[in-house]
Image (spheres, grey):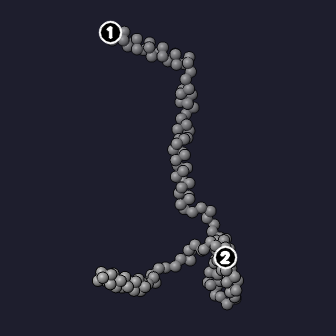
């Protein structure tokens, strides 16, 4: 019985401490995402339409226009991709280039590219030359 009373007292103390937590240190960002529901956006448009912009300061007018654009869905950002998307595109491009290695074929002169294609007559001629040289070296040493 004593354990149950102690547990209830501990719970009450913790609940009191939890209620006294403050969140003043949390900062608000003007760039935070707006709710996506159409109902919320319609309500916000109605509230924004009721504001008399003639009484606003120039700075407040800028904020009002920015909020209006965000509620409408046209933020006016000039960047089409986020930096993360650009990084992914760069990595994929590098992987494709590494896989295909186009610089190997671009760096070779035409003579090397031609010598890589096997010509049966030329191959036989070069083989005969090597065999003669080997035979001459063997004859001179022996």
Q: SS at mark 2?
A: helix
Cα–Cα gap, marks 1 and 2: 101 Å
Residue in view at x 33 percent, y 81 percent: 4
Toward the viewer: 90 or 38?
Answer: 38
The image quadrant where one finds the N terminus is: bottom left
Picture coordinates of residue 95, whole percent (x, y) = 52, 47
Label 2 sits on residue = 39
**Is the residue 116 above or below the residue 85 in the image?**
above
Residue 140 seen in this snapshot: yes
**Residue shown at 54% from the left, 46% from the top:** 96
Q: Is residue 13 above or below residue 124?
A: below
User: Which image quarter: residue 61?
Assistant: bottom right
Q: Nearer the viewer, mark 1 or mark 2?
A: 2
All told, the count of numbered labels is 2
Q: Position of residue 123 (x, y in %)?
A: 52, 19
Q: Is 77 situated left or right of 5 in this image?
A: right
The quadrant in which the C terminus is found is top left
Residue occupying the point 60% across, 74% down: 35
Nearer the observer, 137 or 91: 91
Disc 1 and disc 2 in contact, CB within 8 angstroms: no
Q: Relative to residue 132, is residue 95 depicted above or below?
A: below
What is the crowding at mark 1: few (fewer than 14 residues within 10 Å), some, or many (at least 20)?
few
Q: Which residue is mark 1?
A: 142
Q: Quadrant of residue 18?
A: bottom left
Q: Quadrant of residue 110?
A: top right
Q: Position of residue 43 (x, y in %)?
A: 67, 80
User: Where in the figure is residue 5, as x and y percent of width and height?
Assistant: 32, 84
Residue at 53% x, 35% y: name it: 108
């Amino acid at each position: 019985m004593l354990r149950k009373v102690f547990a209830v007292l501990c719970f009450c103390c913790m609940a009191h401490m939890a209620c006294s937590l403050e969140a003043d240190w949390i900062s608000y960002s003007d760039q935070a995402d707006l709710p996506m529901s159409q109902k919320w956006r319609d309500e916000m448009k109605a509230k924004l339409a009721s504001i008399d912009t003639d009484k606003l300061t120039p700075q407040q007018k800028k904020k009002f226009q920015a909020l209006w654009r965000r509620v409408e869905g046209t933020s006016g950002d000039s960047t089409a991709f986020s930096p993360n998307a650009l990084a992914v595109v760069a990595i994929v491009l590098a992987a494709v280039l590494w896989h295909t290695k186009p610089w190997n074929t671009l760096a070779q002169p035409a003579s090397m590219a031609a010598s890589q294609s096997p010509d049966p007559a030329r191959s036989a001629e070069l083989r005969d030359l090597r065999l003669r040289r080997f035979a001459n070296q063997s004859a001179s040493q022996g």
